[in-house]
């Protein structure tokens, strides 16, 4: 029987007790996740390594302030999301002149429909960003990363019923925000 790999909390404890390789083990465990999130958000391979390095530095600098060491993965995912969102917010929006727009590949979808769909996605993203962290996190994991409630529950160390309730409550909050802002 192979020995069980150390938990995240164990590796963090080892690191603070002088084992410098423990931090490398922790990073190697989560680097694929970080890289995947970065690529899915910024969609540029040329930036992925720079942003990963920035995320690693933030992880390194903030590790001593992490209170719940067993929630390391969630904490690192939050750092990753926030780092990417900050980078995205500093980038100029690309504007394509109307004359360069061509009809959609689907003749039944007009340019106006495509523009409207993009505006709706932008507004939805803004409303999601305004949700409290716990709700925003489960919405992102469920709808944008395709994780089931059971997977999210395991990842966050929460009961599955709590995750389902948060998803439900977040959807209610989004519907209310849409009504208040006149989108529905």
Image: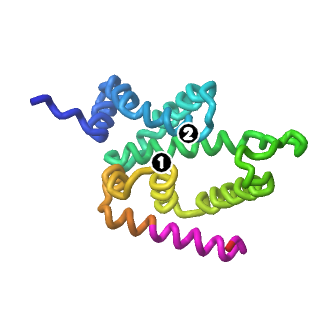
- Between 127 and 87, which is closer to the camera in this rendering? 127
- Counting from the top left corner in percent of width and height, residue 95 is at 83, 43
| Residue at the extreme right | 99
Image point 45% across, 50% down: which residue? 146
Residue 129 sits in quarter? bottom right
Residue where numbered disc 1 is placed: 145
Label count reads 2
- Between 91 and 15, which is closer to the camera in this rendering? 91
Image point 52% across, 68% down: which residue? 171
Query: Is residue 80 located in the magenta-colored stretch of the structure?
Result: no
Left or right: 14 as drawn, with respect to 146: left
Q: Residues within 10 Å of mark 1 (few under 14, many from 20)?
A: few
Residue 69 versus residue 153 in the image, above or below: above
Residue where numbered disc 2 is placed: 40
Query: Is residue 181 located in the magenta-colored stretch of the structure?
Result: yes
Q: Earlier in the sequence, mark 2 or mark 1?
A: 2
Q: Is residue 153 visible?
A: yes
- Counting from the top left corner in percent of width and height, residue 26 is at 36, 32
Over which residues does the magenta segment extend? 168-183
């Amino acid at each position: 029987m192979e020995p069980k790999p150390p938990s995240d909390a164990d590796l963090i404890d080892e690191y603070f007790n002088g084992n410098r390789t423990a931090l490398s083990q922790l990073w190697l465990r989560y680097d694929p996740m970080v890289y995947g999130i970065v690529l899915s958000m910024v969609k540029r391979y040329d930036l992925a390594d720079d942003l990963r390095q920035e995320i690693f530095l933030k992880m390194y600098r903030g590790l001593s302030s992490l209170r719940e060491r067993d929630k390391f993965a969630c904490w690192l995912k939050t750092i990753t999301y926030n780092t990417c969102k900050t980078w995205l917010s500093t980038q100029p929006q690309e504007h394509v002149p109307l004359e360069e727009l061509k009809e959609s590949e689907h003749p039944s979808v007009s340019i106006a429909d495509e523009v409207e769909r993009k505006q709706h996605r932008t507004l939805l993203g803004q409303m999601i960003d305004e949700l409290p962290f716990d709700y925003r996190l489960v919405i992102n994991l469920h709808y944008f990363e395709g994780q089931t409630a059971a997977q999210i529950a395991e990842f966050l160390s929460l009961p599955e019923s709590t995750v389902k309730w948060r998803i439900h409550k977040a959807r209610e909050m989004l519907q209310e925000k849409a009504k208040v802002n006149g989108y529905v």
